[in-house]
Amino acid sequence: MADYLGDPTPRLAGRLKLNPFVHLDMMGTLFLFFVGFGWGKPVPFDPYNL
């Protein structure tokens, strides 16, 4: 969505991939398996480019 609105930051960071391993956070994935909840990597964006 940020790329669509004019912010190239996610594209330049390589976050527009279909590969799920690009979006996984190691600690969040471990928590998912051991605790039952997890998280992914945040997508960087520049609000001034939106």
Image: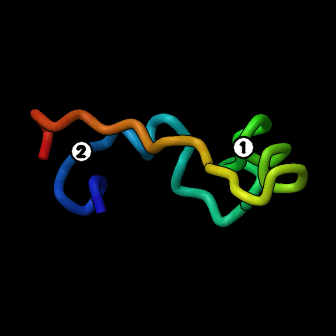
Residue at the limit of the structure toward the right, as seen here: 34
Q: Residue visible at 81% across and 51% down? A: 35
21 shown above or below 10:
below
Residue type highlighted by circle 2: Asp
Q: Which mark is residue 28?
A: 1
Q: Is residue 12 left or right of residue 29?
A: left
Residue 33 location, quadrant: bottom right
Nearest to the observer: residue 8 or residue 44: 44
Q: Position of residue 30 (x, y in %)?
A: 85, 44
Task: State the residue at coordinates (27%, 54%).
Answer: 2
CA distance for labels 2 and 1: 26 Å
Q: Amino acid at mark 1?
A: Gly
- Could you tell me which residue is drawn at 45 percent across and 36 percent down? 12
Residue lying furthest front: 35
Question: Which quadrant does the N terminus fall into?
Answer: bottom left
Marking on residue 20: none
Left or right: 17 in relation to 8: right
